[in-house]
Amino acid sequence: MKFASRIARLHASPVREILRAATGRQVVSLAGGLPDPDTFPQLAGLESQRSQYGLTEGDLDLRQEISALLAKRGLCCPPERILVLNGSQQGLDLAAKLLVEEGTSVLCESPTYVAALQVFSLFGAQLEGMAIGPEGSSRQDLTESFRRCDPAMAYVIPSFQNPTGALWSEDAREALASELDHRTECVLLEDDPYGELWWGQAPPAPVASRLRKAPWIYLGSFSKSFVPGLRMGFLACSEELITPLERLKQASDLHSNRLAQGWVLSDLCDPNREERLADLRARYRFKCDVFAESLKRHFPNAQFRKPSGGLFFWANLVPGRDLRDIAHLALEAGVAFLPGEHCFPSAPDLGWARLNFSHASVEDADRALGVLAGICRSR
Ligand SMILES: Cc1ncc(COP(=O)(O)O)c(C=O)c1O
């Protein structure tokens, strides 16, 4: 595994190290710029012990709960190897800062999450796409993709992939893990913001949990299953990556918002959390079913697969039709969607659209698809 050359210039902040050493001990700290706690106003929902500056890695009680959450998903990671983040998007940024420089080969699913492509490109990645089907990438495609580009980082979203909704099977996850373990130099970046949003069956254990040797970073989010405006996510990683990742976060923002950490902790400890998630899943299952019916009605020839989790349909609305000119006409008519071309690491396919079904009401979504179909017919 090769870190980007800028990492040689990355040092720990001495102040942060001192503050960490002083945490929980009777130390008179003259080290940091900590305000007097007696001056803190009582803010609704903010307990006094979370008003002060906190640890870069995040509050220990929250990291312990995240560790327990991961164990339920099949991934064993102690709190010491967990970093609380400002959304999992921050994890993409930190991973890219650590590993990507001009010309670094990064393998991603094709298509993939558009904002990951944005970050990787910013750091100069040489983006390489690997084909995926509804159950992930086949063993043969995987081997062939790895051989072709010899990536330094492999970025995947195995559970309800954005944008395709693909759910990597046990077999595909095993195949990816064994390919990575054969290499040991390539870092797995596994992004899992949708893992709790399922309504068929829960996803298989993460790819990261199947690795024996290869280095890995696993990203989780509280945006889709809790509250996106809190901007709370986390990363878990293999031993050798935690120190540089923590320093990168330190250099970027010192630590995440502690009020938001408190809110996430209270959700994770809520005995009714599973019930809340069950309601969320039932609601999205309903919306997803109705959306699929609307899609079939308005676009009788569309190619798409109904997802069993996540938030998107990936549809070839009118096979053979380039959608690029449709997007702005649709927007003028009050309908927004993401043309699929933006989701490809290279060689975009121009006929696909990413359509979100969770946000709009089923009536509004049906009306929007009708408007879109009308525009496609008229052009
Ligand atoms: C695949 C994927 N990764 C990361 C993110 C970022 O999520 P967060 O809100 O946790 O930053 C998203 C958001 O849509 C996403 O779809």
Image (cartoon, grey):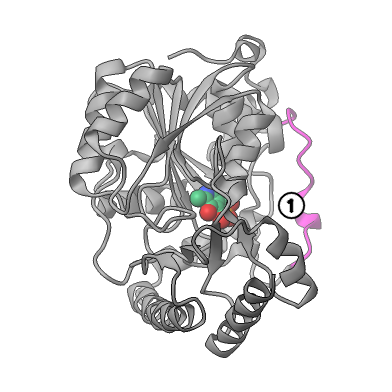
- Element type at marker 1? helix
Name of the residue lying farthest toward the bottom:
363
Q: Is residue 30 magenta?
A: yes
**Highlighted range, magenta:** 29-42
- In this picture, residue 324 sits left or right of residue 82: right
Kindly identify which residue carries mark 1: 37
Q: Is residue 21 visible?
A: no
Q: Residue 180 or 259: which is nearer the viewer?
A: 180
Indicate whether 163 appears above or below 110: below
The x, y position of residue 148, in whole percent, is: 39, 19
Q: Is residue 314 visible?
A: yes
In what quadrant of the picture does the C terminus appear?
bottom right
Q: Is residue 10 magenta?
A: no
Q: Residues within 10 Å of mark 1 (few under 14, many from 20)?
A: few
The x, y position of residue 364, in whole percent, is: 61, 86
Indicate whether 302 appears above or below 5: below
In which quadrant of the rendered view does residue 326 lie?
bottom right
**Amino acid type for the residue under numbered disc 1:** Pro
